[in-house]
Image: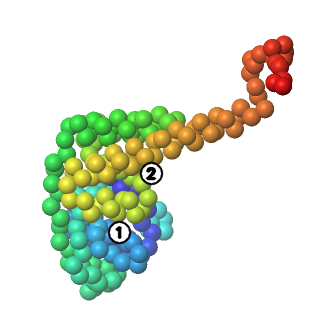
Amino acid sequence: MLPLHIFEERYRELIYDCEILDMTFGIPAYIGSSMEYGTEVKLEKVVETYPDSSKDVICRGLQVFRIEEFTSRQEGRKYGGGTVHFLENIENGTAEQLDQFKGLIKELYVQLEIPPPKKNSHNINSYTLSHKIGLSLEQEYTLLKLLTEKERLEFLINHLSIIIPVVQELNRTRTVIEMNGHFKKFDPLDFEDYKIEE
């Protein structure tokens, strides 16, 4: 699920067409001044329409595509479009992978000391929470191009296995910094058994 704020005229026109024609649209990933892959999405709900005609909308991701042809402006429309090839999604992830993935997400949010994302645990897959675990744009793009659930879960498990120890170390560092100058219950040194070696 993807919340969007639509304010540009061309995208207001696109959302209007989606409402009237019940069509889907694509969100391409713009990386390194090029577009190659993207996600087909469906308008689920217009949450609010503002006096300036901008809108808050909720969209749902459907499937990944590779762009074959693109034009910045479709005939008779203000928004762009093109021809795409939809990639086959191979659902071959294992229950063990999914359990490990969910466990690592839980651990990440414990370490971050923030409430975990509210998701039905039965509906979690590699796509549902990937934008909530600290992936960079480049990492999200790499994930988008992986064709199998097994590969995607391996990628995300690896990411979490790297980032959780980093967060733990940051928490430890924060604790040390907060303790600076605040020593508690240290026994005073009496030097009774201290000797200088000759």
Disc on res. 29: 1
Residue count near mark 1 (Cα–Cα under 10 Å), binned few <14, some 14–19, many ≥20: some
For the point 45% across and 46% down, which residue is it?
Answer: 163
**Where in the figure is residue 167, as x and y percent of width and height?**
52, 42
Disc on the earlier residue, 2 or 1 = 1
Taking the image as shown, residue 136 lies to the left or right of residue 197, namely left
For the point 25% across and 40% down, which residue is it?
Answer: 97
Q: Residue furthest top?
A: 192
Inspect the image, locate mark 1, and give the three-letter code of the amino acid beneath it: Ala
**Considering the image in quadrants, where does the C terminus appear?**
top right
Q: Residue furthest bottom?
A: 75
Residue situated in front as seen by the camera: 62 or 16: 62
For the point 16% across and 50% down, which residue is it?
Answer: 91
Inspect the image, locate mark 2, and give the three-letter code of the amino acid beneath it: Gly
**Where in the figure is residue 124, as x and y percent of width and height?**
27, 42
Q: Which residue is mark 2?
A: 134
